[in-house]
Amino acid sequence: MLFLLIGNSIFSQNNSKGFALLELYTSEGCSSCPPADELLGKIQNEYKDKNVYVLAYHVDYWDKQGWKDIFSNADFTKRQYDYAQFLGKEPIYTPQVIINGKTDYIGSQETSLRNGIKLALSKPAAVDLSLETKQQNDKLSLNYSINGTFKNSHLLIAVVQKSAKSNVKRGENAHRVLSHYQIVQRLQTIDLKVAKGNSTITLPKNFNTQDFEIIGFVQDIKSGAILGVKRA
């Protein structure tokens, strides 16, 4: 059920159901990435009313190949390396999709990705996460509440741009206009010590409630497993 209040958005749902958080690692400099970007955009649209969430992280290790991805971030490359440690799978690559922090897939392989989503949805969430947000100029005030066991966990808050297009001039995708979906612009980590708390997030300059959304998720820092997720 969705409740909208002036200045606030509260999303509440029975999170005993399963969920699928798809984390895509991609780059404008990678010729095999556009099909994955398109597929994740298709999945996002298809499952928008379900417990399926898409986050696209643009990594920076392709930036030296002739084209700098305007959405790339070294922190996202580090996050992908962390997953390589969790999953015991190196070297890292694009396009890679990791579902619920547990299993990785080649991002353009639709059948295996859809099977992964079905498997994730069949397993109940470990925690129930509630988020309440309020925008104040370029800041986002966030209140969170967690029901369930969250020892050794972080709460991560992703500020997500829903879509964008880029005219790529050089590199492997030279002279192409690329479509991007669910682009992570900010990723803030909150160290969880109590079940309820608050935080402040700095928003991108072009942030607006129509073109962006906030997705929060709880992650076990020892295994990388995602325990619960919520859209605010």
Image (cartoon, rainbow, N blue to C red):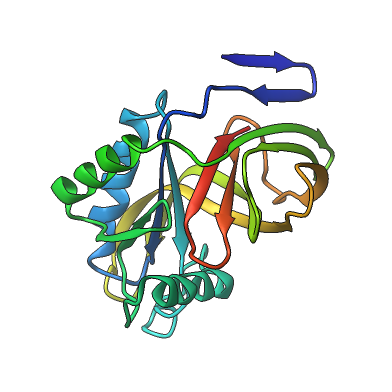
Res. 105 image quadrant: bottom left
Q: Residue at x 57, y 39 (%)?
A: 127
Asked whether, in this view, residue 25 is left or right of residue 175, the answer is right
Residue in front for this viewpoint, 154 or 200: 154
Residue 195: x %, y % from top left: 75, 42
The percent coordinates of residue 193 (x first, y second) are 78, 54
Which residue is rendered at x = 36% and y = 84% of the image? 65
Q: State the image quarter where residue 92 is shown.
A: bottom left
Q: Would you identify the image quadrant in which residue 64 lies?
A: bottom left
**Is 92 rendered above or below residue 173?**
below
Name the residue located 68 percent from the left edge and 59 percent from the top edge: 189
Quarter of the image that includes the N terminus: top right
- The outermost residue toward the left is 111
Towards the viewer: 174 or 121: 121
Residue placed most toward the observer, 29 or 150: 150
Quadrant of the rendering where the C terminus is positioned: top right
Which residue is the extreme one toward the bottom? 64
Extreme residue in the right direction = 136
118 shown above or below 178: above
Determine the residue positioned at 35% across, 31% down. 45
User: x and y percent of residue 75 in the render?
Assistant: 58, 72
x, y percent for residue 114: 22, 42
